[in-house]
């Protein structure tokens, strides 16, 4: 029995509050939760970061391995994003095979990173067609109070920005204890982020706390970055079964750049 | 007497850190660190145990899960439980259960989740220390705290709370790892493991060293628990 | 009405204000001496009374007990709890009360006679009720709606606080909850399981009531909390 399911009363109350443009924590519907970033969660990772966004806390770490390229891209390194919704982080997360949320979260982040071109995968080749670097990003929520995907997007970008290559020994093996000072081949100006818009009744809202997320009837996650100074949507996925109307979609894409800039204003302080 | 690679004295532990209440969703939670080894623990429950056939009508059940985060170690640990983590989960459960009285919660489970953020040797003992604080924080009836630390043996000499570099000591008799846990302030040991080589007559010294270490750990745990109260 | 039920439980905790209280960890000696009697959360070992859990040690005369400061809700007979209907069965309702063991409300324990076919009109899935625990059996909790102030909760909303903070929300002889009700004009019911129901005349007063309750619940231990709350209301 999940004790976290929302009651009818609270859902109705949230609907009428949203209709009046109000939230329990005093934010407007499209106001984001404040966040902070901390680097170096694990000195064993090639890069790592922790994001605290309201009561949500999530950590991401980067590990580097040497592998073989995929046959269809012999001149590119590999990127793998994975997530584990630890039962430590919420009474809703259970031990055992991953549920859909645990599968979807890393896929959303993977597409956001990959399609933005943030990592120059070609520069991860050691011997073309034979040996390449594999970048593995692992995501772990520590406390889930809503908006995990958007918090994860910040944590992953921060961990990648924080990462350095381990030393490659002459025998081709990695010496993890000898870190180089060489950073990953990241496109400096490309910072992808996700924004998940949630819908309850006719209201759109961002950055929910747990109960708001439970109350939502539909949601859509968009990955956005900038290419040569222009905003680019890189990924999109709608979740849950209530449709979005065209007018709502237009509103969302219009809001995206504004929200992106808002997050970047804070994030930039941590990226220097 | 060999000099410890860390430069510490034989019975000198790494600096410890502890904090209680780090995971708001949990009924109890704590962090415990020995130097660069960082463990976090969350307790959920008593709550209903599924599947029902595992329920015990005479008492609540303790269930421990220990694991490493993938990037807590130099070579990425593949997600999901390994044989190692399953064994450590089980011995941790046995190490903690003697102080718990769960008879007031029949048919329920108390879940203890332990994860290692950063591993530099001593992860199971740090995990036990964190879990002990998290169980107390969760208000579970508990006779006492559990304190845990490993004694290392480098060649022929004992070294309390060895770090990873010391665990790789390979001269003479090499390194021996002896992780132990005990009920605070008593002479009762609840975790005993050993890997390596040690003459039987040295065990008494090992226990004395652990007694000294556990006294220090207990003070750190006690302080962290008291600190959450305004 | 419901608060009265809770106050009885609560009085033991709050009526002893002025007694010496301090934080203890499991296994810590609270007092030494033959005269003291170990109460809840304490045990005797030789000359000493020792804490059996983490919490606030309190010496009231000869009696020593340890009041929990945190942790999951442990159901007790006679507690009034708030719950959410998760299933309607042929002979009653399955209710989530956020505690170990499932709770069941038999149709015979509804406040008035109900036909089987009107059950889900009276209480459907997701609906909220305040109920009293009338028995705790092996696998579950049995609830009743027979009693003043019990029944389906209509309007307003539910939120959750840590169950160990419920006594502070109620306050000494209900002083805290009375203050919050007066200042916000809201109807408030606090279940022992930490679920809180608030219903006010307008959204703003409901939001304020929740904020006030969460402000109190976030404080682990503060003396003179009612005075602090008066100040909070002046500032908010």
Image: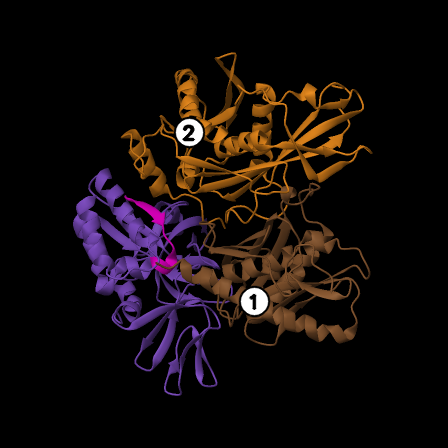
Where residue A85 appears, as percent x and y from the top left, is 57, 42
Give the chain coloured orange.
Answer: A
For residue C161: magenta? yes
Q: Is residue C152 magenta?
A: no
In the image, are marks 1 and 2 on the same chain?
A: no
Q: Chain of mark 1?
A: B
**Above or below B152: residue C90:** above
Q: Indicate whether C80 appears above or below A38.
A: below
**How far across and down, in percent of the image, does residue B1 sit?**
73, 65
Which residues are the magenta region?
C156-165
Q: Which residue is mark 1?
A: B146
What separation in Å lies between label 1 and label 2 (alpha carbons)?
42 Å
| Residue named by callout 2 | A266
Residue B115 at x, y percent in the picture: 59, 50
Q: Residues within 10 Å of mark 1 (few under 14, many from 20)?
A: many
Q: Which colour denotes chain B?
A: brown
Q: Is residue A46 above or below residue B94?
A: above
Question: Disc 1 vs disc 2: Cβ atoms closer than 8 Å?
Answer: no
SS class, disc 1: strand
Q: Is residue B81 left or right of residue B19?
A: right
Q: Closer to the camera: disc 1 or disc 2?
A: 2
Subunit of label 2: A
Q: Is residue B140 left or right of residue A34?
A: right
| Mark 2: secondary structure | helix
User: Which of the chains is purple?
Assistant: C
Give the residue displayed 31% in from the left and 49% down from the top.
C214
Depicted C40 relative to depicted B229: above or below:
below
Between C127 and B128, the one lying in front of the other is: B128
């Amino acid at each position: 029995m999940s004790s976290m399911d929302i009651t009818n009363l609270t859902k109705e109350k949230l609907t009428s509050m949203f209709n009046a443009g109000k939230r329990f924590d005093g934010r407007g519907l499209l106001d984001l939760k404040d966040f902070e970033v901390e680097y170096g969660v694990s000195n064993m990772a090639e890069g790592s970061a922790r994001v605290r966004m309201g009561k949500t806390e999530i950590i991401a770490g980067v590990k580097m391995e040497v592998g073989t390229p995929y046959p269809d891209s012999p001149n590119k390194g590999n990127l793998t994003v994975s997530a584990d919704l630890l039962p430590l982080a919420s009474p809703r997360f259970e031990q055992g095979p991953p549920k859909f949320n645990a599968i979807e979260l890393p896929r959303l982040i993977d597409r956001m990173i990959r399609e933005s071109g943030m990592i120059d995968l070609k520069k991860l080749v050691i011997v073309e067609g034979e040996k390449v670097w594999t970048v593995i990003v692992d995501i772990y929520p520590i406390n889930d109070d809503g908006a995990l995907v958007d918090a994860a997007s910040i944590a992953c970008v921060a961990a990648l920005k924080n990462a350095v290559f381990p030393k490659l020994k002459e025998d081709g093996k990695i010496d993890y204890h000898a870190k180089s000072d060489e950073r990953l081949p990241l496109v400096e100006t490309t910072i992808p982020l996700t924004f998940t818009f949630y819908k309850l009744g006719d209201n759109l809202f961002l950055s929910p706390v747990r109960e708001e997320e439970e109350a939502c009837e539909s949601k859509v996650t968009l990955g956005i970055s900038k290419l040569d100074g222009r905003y680019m949507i890189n990924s999109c996925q709608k979740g849950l079964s209530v449709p979005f109307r065209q007018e709502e979609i237009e509103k969302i894409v219009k809001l995206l750049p504004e929200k992106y800039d808002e997050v970047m204003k804070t994030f930039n302080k941590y990226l220097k | 007497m060999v000099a410890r690679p860390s430069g510490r004295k034989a019975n000198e532990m790494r600096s410890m850190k502890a904090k209680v209440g780090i995971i708001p969703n949990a009924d109890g939670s704590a962090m415990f660190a020995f130097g660069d080894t960082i463990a976090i623990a969350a307790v959920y429950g008593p709550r209903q145990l599924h599947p029902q056939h595992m329920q015990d009508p005479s008492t609540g059940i303790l269930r421990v899960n220990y694991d490493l985060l993938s990037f807590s170690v130099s070579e990425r640990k593949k997600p999901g439980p390994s044989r190692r983590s399953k064994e450590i989960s089980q011995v941790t459960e046995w190490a903690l259960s003697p102080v718990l009285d769960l008879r007031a919660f029949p048919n329920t489970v108390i879940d203890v989740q332990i994860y290692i953020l950063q591993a530099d040797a001593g992860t199971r003992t740090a995990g036990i220390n964190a879990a002990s604080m998290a169980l107390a924080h969760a208000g579970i009836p508990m006779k006492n705290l559990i304190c845990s630390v490993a004694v290392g043996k480098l060649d022929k000499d004992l070294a309390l709370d060895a770090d990873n570099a010391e665990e790789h000591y390979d001269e003479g008799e090499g390194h021996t790892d002896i992780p132990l846990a005990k009920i605070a302030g008593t002479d009762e040991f609840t975790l005993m493991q050993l890997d390596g080589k040690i003459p039987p007559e040295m065990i008494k010294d090992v226990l004395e060293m652990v007694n000294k270490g556990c006294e220090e750990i207990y003070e750190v745990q006690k302080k962290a628990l008291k600190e959450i109260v305004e | 009405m419901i608060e009265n039920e809770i106050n009885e439980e609560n009085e033991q905790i709050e009526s002893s204000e002025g007694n010496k209280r301090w934080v203890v960890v499991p296994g810590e000696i609270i007092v030494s001496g033959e005269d003291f009697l170990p109460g809840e959360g304490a045990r005797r070992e030789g000359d000493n009374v020792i804490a059996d859990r983490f919490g606030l040690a309190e010496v009231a005369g000869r009696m020593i007990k340890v009041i929990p400061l945190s942790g999951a809700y442990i159901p007790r007979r006679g507690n009034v709890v708030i719950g959410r209907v998760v299933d309607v069965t042929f002979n009653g309702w399955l209710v989530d009360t956020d505690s170990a063991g499932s709770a069941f409300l038999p149709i015979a324990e509804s406040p008035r006679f109900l036909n089987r076919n009107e059950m889900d009109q009276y209480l459907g899935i997701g609906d909220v009720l305040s109920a009293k625990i009338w028995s705790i059996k092996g696998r579950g909790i049995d609830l009743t709606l027979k009693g003043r102030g019990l029944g389906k909760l209509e309007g307003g909303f539910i939120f959750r606080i840590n169950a160990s903070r419920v006594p502070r929300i109620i306050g000494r002889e209900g002083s805290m909850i009375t203050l919050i009700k007066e200042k916000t004009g809201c109807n408030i019911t606090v279940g022992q399981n930490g679920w809180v129901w608030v219903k006010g005349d307008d959204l703003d007063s409901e939001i304020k009531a929740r904020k006030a309750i969460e402000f109190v619940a976030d404080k682990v231990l503060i003396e003179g909390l009612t005075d602090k709350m008066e100040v909070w209301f002046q500032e908010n």
